[in-house]
Image (cartoon, helix red, strand yellow):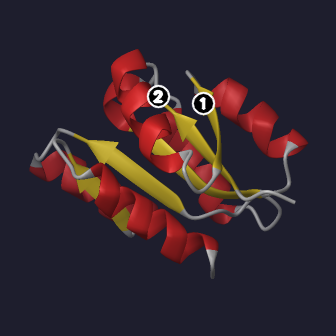
Amino acid sequence: MNKVVLSINADKAMTFVLESVIEKEFEVITVEDVYAAATQLKKRLNIKVIIVDVDNTQRDVWDFIHHVKTSKFYFKPIILLTSNKSKLMSKQIESTGIKYFFYKPFSPSEILKKIVTLSNT
């Protein structure tokens, strides 16, 4: 069974960058919204890591993150991407318990390293 990374991002350029780096070691499923992501979580039990770009998704993304982090069935490590370095964003990240996040611009190779680490736990 292949290790799979689920990426939620409506920005096609960012999706291309992430896919280009991650697909070297993982199967990558890309979706544009959390509803498609929820469908993939139900269908694909081999998803190891979820990447969420909160800059390029709808507001429901925080509800989705909360659901994944509190669900015993769907719990998966989440890597969050954002360009927002505000105190409000920092509080939002902290309140959801996100441990892994990258501020844009970021190093795609650093994200790949984090995915490799998380997929082996």
Residue 37: x %, y % from top left: 68, 34
Residue extending furthest toward the left: 86
Q: Earlier in the sequence, mark 1 or mark 2?
A: 2
Q: Is residue 52 left or right of residue 103?
A: right
Extreme residue toward the front, this view: 24
Residue positioned 53% across, 34% down in the render: 8
Q: Residue at x 42, y 68 (%)?
A: 114
Q: Residue at x 42, y 59 (%)?
A: 112
Name the quarter where the C terminus is drawn.
bottom right
Residue annotated with mark 1: 30
Question: Horizontally, is 96 left or right of 74 in the view?
Answer: left
In contact (CB < 8 Å): disc 1 and disc 2: yes
Q: Quadrant of the N terminus?
A: bottom right
Helix, strand or loop under label 2: loop
Residue at x 61%, y 61% (from the top left corner): 69
Q: Is residue 111 above or below residue 35?
A: below
Using residue 1 as the reference point, say whether residue 91 is left or right of it. left
The residue carrying mark 2 is: 9
Choose between 27 and 8: the one closer to the eye.
27
Q: Residues within 10 Å of mark 2 (few under 14, many from 20)?
A: many
**Disc 1 residue type?**
Thr
- Tag 1's secondary structure? strand
Residue situated in front as seen by the camera: 70 or 54: 54
Dot 1, crowdedness within 10 Å: few (<14), some or many (≥20)? many
